[in-house]
Image: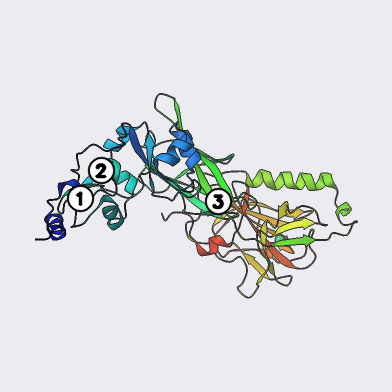
Amino acid sequence: MPEMALLALLVALGLWFGLYAGLSAPRAHAQENVGSYTVVAGDTLFEIAQRFGVSLDALVALNNIQDPSLIRVGQVLLIPGASHNLAAIPTTLVQTLPGDTLALVAQRYNQDINLLTSLNNVSATTRLFPGQTVRLPADQAPPPLRFGAVREILWPAQLVQGRTGRLTIITERPLDLTADWNGLPLTFLPADESGVRYFTFLPVPALLGPGLFPLTVTYTAGNGEQLSRQQLIPVADGGYDSQIIELPPDRASLLDPTLVTSETAKVVAVWSQVSPTLWWREQFWRPIADQYRTTSPFGTRRSYNGGPFNSYHAGQDFGAPAGVTVTAPAAGIVALAEPLLVRGNAILLDHGHGVFTGYWHLSELRVAPGQQVAAGDLLGLVGNTGLSTGAHLHWEMRISGVAVDPMQFLDEPLAPPE
Ligand SMILES: [Zn+2]
């Protein structure tokens, strides 16, 4: 038998020991203290390095990362100096196929090769015996973000400028939770009767980002100690248009700045309240009939007389003739109904838990403060009062004071079902 044929036979029989390494064989570059971390939404490599007290360079080198700005959710990173984490990973055993390497196993099971080399203490390219067992992580899902009695913190996969997300927190036991969303304080409501599920709305200012912004969740433990955890949350671009508005020089002087400031203070004082009851659970209805289309959408960035684009349209304008009926989009309490200088005849509805809708420039008000309304109830009539250049309805939504796109609430029931 020629030598090459003998070699091929030996390889086929798995007898060529020089080509194989036992799974327990020590690795050439043994890492004594290596743990792992699964990337979650909002993570950056820099922040992960900081969190584990390791250098960015060490993290990049150990994980063989080509581009430190490209890490993906669910990716398992090896963390130097934290071997105890690795032992805690629940694993399952699978058998190798003929011709397998750990790299091929990783590919077949959609696993991170670096994690597999550490779990199995064998290099990626070493040929394995057919039928040998390899350890894989039992669960590929990223571990929940937990701390103390907080079991899980859930937020939307993507937050967008000017839109609203829902933040849900699952706890071990009833907790008094608060959150700080990039400087905006948030409180929670029970999501259901369980006593361990809470939610709040996560309004994204139209001019925030895009980028990563901190969300801090806090609760007070039984011993009075405040426990909190911060997570960076990505905010995506809202794709809003820009508009340059030329104001005639005399236009602004029509308004007494003191009166404008006091009007602003008045409406801000109203929509800064957080009622403990959420008055609605379903998606919102349009406040005006379908035939009246949008003339100016929420979020358009505005520059006045060529200045910076540092303001935006805080509501949704519907073009409609004076006298068209305006109705409540959801249940709530009338928090304000009076003539204002800029906003004209104005109504603010309190829908509960910091959610308000506003209706400006009306010709007539048909509700009074304190009145309870249901979805579809008459609020007033379209008009051209206040600082308005033609009959239209300006519909605005404020959540914890932040102006967000009200149209989103027509499509999505953002409150959890009762
Ligand atoms: Zn408007």
| Nearer mark to the viewer, of 1 and 3 | 1
Residue 235 in the figure: left or right of residue 193? right
- Residues tagged 1 and 3 counted as in contact (Cβ below 8 A): no
Tag 3 and tag 2, C-beta contact below 8 Å: no
**Residue occupying the point 44% across, 32% down:** 54
Q: Position of residue 145 (x, y in %)?
A: 40, 42
Q: Earlier in the sequence, mark 3 or mark 2?
A: 2
Whole-percent x, y for residue 119 in the image: 27, 41
Q: Residues within 10 Å of mark 2 (few under 14, many from 20)?
A: many
Residue at 50% in and 54% down: 158
Task: Establish whether ligand 1 lies closer than 8 Å to the Cβ of label 2.
Answer: no
Marks 1 and 3, the one that precedes in the sequence: 1
State the separation of the CA atoms marked 3 and 2: 40 Å
Q: Mark 1 and mark 3: span between their CA atoms?
A: 45 Å
Q: Which residue is mark 1?
A: 128
The amino acid type, in three-letter code, at marker 3 is: Val
Q: Amino acid at mark 1?
A: Leu
The quadrant where ligand 1 appears is: bottom right
Q: Which residue is mark 2?
A: 122
Q: Which one is in front, 273 or 304? A: 304
- As measured in the structure, the alpha-carbon distance from the residue carrying label 1 to the one carrying label 2 is 10 Å
Secondary structure beneath disc 2?
loop
Q: Mark 3 or mark 2: which is in front?
A: 2
Instruction: Kindly identify the residue that appears in the image at 59 percent across and 39 percent down.
Output: 183
Residue tagged 3: 235
Point out the residue furthest to the right here.
Answer: 250
Q: Is residue 218 visible?
A: no
Q: Secondary structure at mark 3?
A: strand
